[in-house]
Amino acid sequence: MDGDLIIGSFFPIHSVEVSNVRGADILFLISYFLFLRWLHKNYQQVLALVFAVQEINMDPSLLPNISSLGFHVYNAYHSDERTLESSLRWLSGQGQIIPNYSCWEQDQPVAIIGGATSALSIQMGTLLELYKFPQISYGPFDSILSDKTQFLSLYQMAHRDSSLHHGMVRLLVKFEWTWVGLVTTDDMRGEEFLWNLRGDMIKHDICLAYTEKLPVSERRHTESQDMFVPRIMQSSVRVIIIHGDTESLMILRYSQPPHFLLWKVWVTTSHWDITMRPQLNDGYSFHGALSFSQMTKDIPGFKSFLRTVNPAKYPEDPLLKEFWCSTFKELKKLENEEPNECSPNASLEMLPLQFFDMAISGLSYTIYNAVHAVARALHEMLLVTSEKESIRDGETWVAQPWQLHNFLKKIHFDNSAGDQVFLDDTENSEAHYNILEYLFFVNGTEALVKVGQFIPNAPHDQDITIYNETIVWGWNEPKPPQAVCSDSCGPGFRKTPREGEPICCFDCSLCPEGEISNQMNMKHCIKCPEDEYPNKERDHCLPKAITFLDIKEPLGMTLTCVALLFSVLTALIFGVFVRFRDTCIVKANNRVLSYTLLISLTLCFLCSLLFIGRPTAATCLFRQTTFGLVFTVAVSSILAKTILVVLAFKIINPRSKSKVWLQPRVSNCIVVLCSVIQVTLCGIWLGISPPFPDTDIHSEPNEIIIECNEGSVFGFYSVLGYIGLLALGSFMVAFTARSLPDTFNEAKFITFSMLMFCSVWVSFLPTYQSTKGKAMVVVEIFSILASSAGLLSCIFIPKCYAILLRPDENIKECIRNKSNCKIEKHFT
């Protein structure tokens, strides 16, 4: 379109496939078309340019009555040589290549809109920077192009997409995909995306199974079948992230075998138009692909404009006629019909998605804004110039391209859709994204359906939204596919990394004893609280049962019955001794000591009951002290008896002054003195660190044992040791008196009883130390009952036998052995 001021534009309208050749011929063949293919959908970019220029020329408030805009359209090739050639042709004018010489006559070039990719922008910018021509890139935002030391004359229109990688990772997290592949371009933009993506993946334990990089220029699509596409097809990775532009990633389309189903989910950006493909019906493999498309608003009047476009309306436009014929011929072939003369009465609205999209694309939207930015910069420049210089009627205003930079830098306006437009990179906002799903139906039709959105600056839990009910997963798949290196570890298991493999590849190990995992794929198991324990599956904690030696349980009931039985038996024996208190056997060796011993043994049996039942502050305080005191009285009584037996046989002369030691009060003093010492020890123990109720949560994994903490361990063993010392003394004295002549010599029985008593308590100490919880209480109760029963049986059972079963012998012995009766008088 002619005009006073010309905007140059470079759009990828055709693609060139270079055959697989060898040798020096490639340098020649790479500069010429060996196979030309229309990229039909990209023609919307040309129409966005036409619409914007027409809108500006019809606006009386822009460049009024002085200048009109025109444009020239060039094809953008992914080849360094072809891009340089096209740029030189435009700079020279009239399609000729004459460096540093311009053939432009009336139409004055002012700016270039181009750079659908970063590679094209860099290739063009290197040349255009020499002439200070403003270059407005409408492709994806690239931080490298913001370097004004290299690209002072280049401006970027697109929104920043620095959050794109985060949106993709959020999508992976949403569907629990942790094992994915990546295909990206082999340039700085691709490297930056890879670096950011990998860093964000590490935070969420997502791994890249592989990374494939595509060359950005001078590609041979047909060679890709020997490159990475077979690896992608054979890989078990189900989810593949695609990052790059349409032309760079067209290699996937050229390399795809017809009707070959890859059964993969592709996650891509709108910079790769997934609907563009070389074959007509090869969309099966990309069915279900998810695309992050930058949000755009509808430009008023643009769809109406597209509906009215046809070659008849623009007869002077040969490119439109060529596009029209190519498109509708391909459509007829697709429908198995004979093509007519280019369908002159057809409409773009009739075309399927693979040929044309009536919804404005992100690139077309950016082109529209770029044209308006140039026009407004020219308008500002015109106003400044008109203030300084008068422009006569009919005189053409000449704008030098290098003068436009000062005005482009300051451009800031609202477009017709209501969006703010900047050319200053620092003020570019973050892009917002619609998540679209590509659907390819059995009848060959296709569609892009919105299934979610991603808003980078929204709160974390609200930044991504997925409409699960709208998504179609592959072919007859009811739920999202699994994209994992290893199967998930369920509750009760933890992930164990495999040596030398990525973190996403792991084995599942059962949680250790005492720990659980209640979620999927936990790295570490967690310990249950102290009052809980893991269940059998180790996926949740159960409250521990509170337990103690209860009288209701069989063991507690058995010990209680035994204690009561022996205490009743002891009481019966005491009754027998009282009933036959005047017999020789009862009177022998101080019957008061016998009464005291029997009463203390009864209390010994009964004190074991303090150890049965739920421990309280009172029972804990009294159980050990009561046990210590009654056992001290019992053992000290035996000690006194043993001493009296020895003294009785040593003091033969009744007139000896030593017989004073045979008086009853002496033996009573021995018992009292020994008991007072024990009372003192117990008092000190209770005063310093008394026993108290405590809980044992470690002895049994499933139980909390309520027990008595002894407080001062030293105090407990002092009391126990004192009893042992008395028992050892009684044993030694009795042992020396075991051979004294007497039918009912108690020294023999005391020796056996003390031997049994000491054996029980010597066995008690290591057993008590090696047990925990209720077992400790049971051991102590058993020791109390066993030692008490030993004393009772060894000392009193033989006497009861003689008293009850041999009463005649009892009387006869006393009558027959008068000397013995005389000795017994000293004992009574």
Image: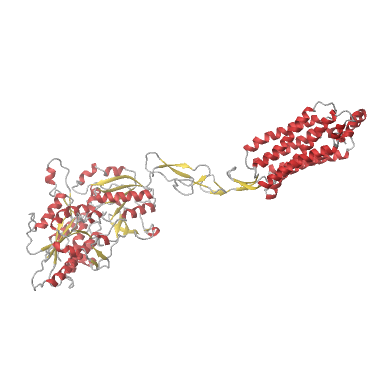
| Relative to 695, 417 lies left or right | left
| Relative to 76, 786 lies left or right | right
| Relative to 437, 42 lies left or right | left
Can residue 581 be seen at all in this image of the molecule? yes
**How far across and how far down the image is residue 455, in percent?**
34, 60
The answer to whether residue 689 is above or below residue 5 is above
Figure quadrant of the N terminus:
bottom left
Can residue 76 be seen at all in this image of the molecule? no
Q: Which of these two is toward me, 545 or 743?
A: 743
- Give the residue drawn at x 80%, y 30%: 747
- Give the residue drawn at x 75%, y 39%: 632
**How far across and how far down the image is residue 415, in percent?**
24, 67
| Location of residue 124 (image quadrant) | bottom left
Figure quadrant of the C terminus:
top right
**How far across and how far down the image is residue 501, in percent?**
37, 40
Q: How is the image coloured?
A: secondary structure
Q: Which of these two is toward me, 323 or 396?
A: 396
Tally of numbered discs: 0
View extreme (front): residue:
657
Q: Which of these two is toward me, 567 or 451?
A: 567
**How far across and how far down the image is residue 807, in percent?**
89, 33
